Image: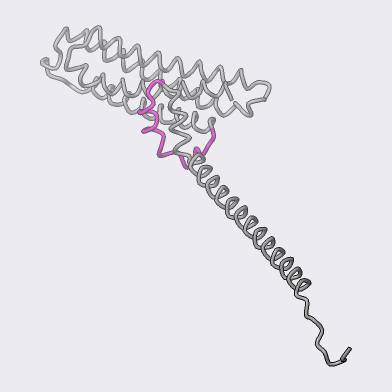
Amino acid sequence: MCDLCIKPFHLGGIDKRERESTKKVNMERNSFSIVTTLVLTTIYLLACSAIISAASSNPADFVRRSCKTTRYPDVCYKSLVSYAPSVKHSPHQLAYTALTVSIDRVRSVSSFVAHLSARPKPNSFFETDRSTEGSAIQDCTDNLKDSVDQLRQSIKEMGHLGRAKASRYAWHLNNVETWVSGALTDETTCLESLSQSAGPKVKTAIRQKVVEAAQVTSNALALVNQLGTH
């Protein structure tokens, strides 16, 4: 046979190698696509989680959620939301702050009523018996002073609470609850005295301020009670 004859050129081996190479490239591309998708999905989920976490960790939201356990949640939130940055997520700090807000409010009302009681008033101011209304105002003043004293004691007792698992935690918490409950009773007694013995003008001048103070104290008591559940 002639040495110069060209031997047939078989393409079968090349086609097989090309197919295998192409298959390998496609598999690598698919693997890369899957990995990329997983990475992007993970990043997305982490971002969502971070957003949700940031929203749920907002101190103002903590105050709002906590205030929902009180009898006057709107009053609670409005009176405490400005303290959210210092309260953060501490139930103890929130209850303590609520007590300080309460004592400030009651002290202010007490001063107002005492000033009203001491200021000379024309007979027209009293629409029932002058001495009876005067006594009602004085009784209210005394009740509010007692309320301030009891709130002061409760704030002092809060400083002894310590950790929730401390041996005397429940005892100190019970003391705080007793003091705050007593303060609220004093405020309620003031309102009852006005309702029974004071005329419309006296009630208008005093009652709403006392009611607002009592609502704040009621909310503080509810937040203190919540400490027993943590």
Is 205 positioned to the left or the right of 185 in the image?
left
Q: Residue at x 36, y 28 (%)?
A: 74
Quadrant including the C terminus: top right
Q: Residue at x 28, y 24 (%)?
A: 209
Residue 15, x across and y down, in percent: 73, 71
Residue 4, x across and y down, in percent: 84, 92
How many numbered callouts? 0
Is 194 positioned to the left or the right of 98 in the image?
left
Which one is in front, 189 or 39? 39
Residue at the front extreme of this rendering: 1
Q: Quadrant of residue 124?
A: top left
Is 162 positioned to the left or the right of 201 in the image?
right
Quadrant including the N terminus: bottom right
Dominant secondary structure of the magenta stretch? helix
Which one is in front, 8 or 13? 8
The span picked out in magenta is: 71-90
Residue 14, x across and y down, in percent: 76, 73
Q: Residue at x 47, y 25 (%)?
A: 152
Q: Is residue 162 part of the magenta span, yes or no?
A: no
Q: Quadrant of residue 187?
A: top left
Which one is in front, 165 or 149? 165
Residue 195, x across and y down, in percent: 25, 10
- Residue 47 position (above or below residue 75): below
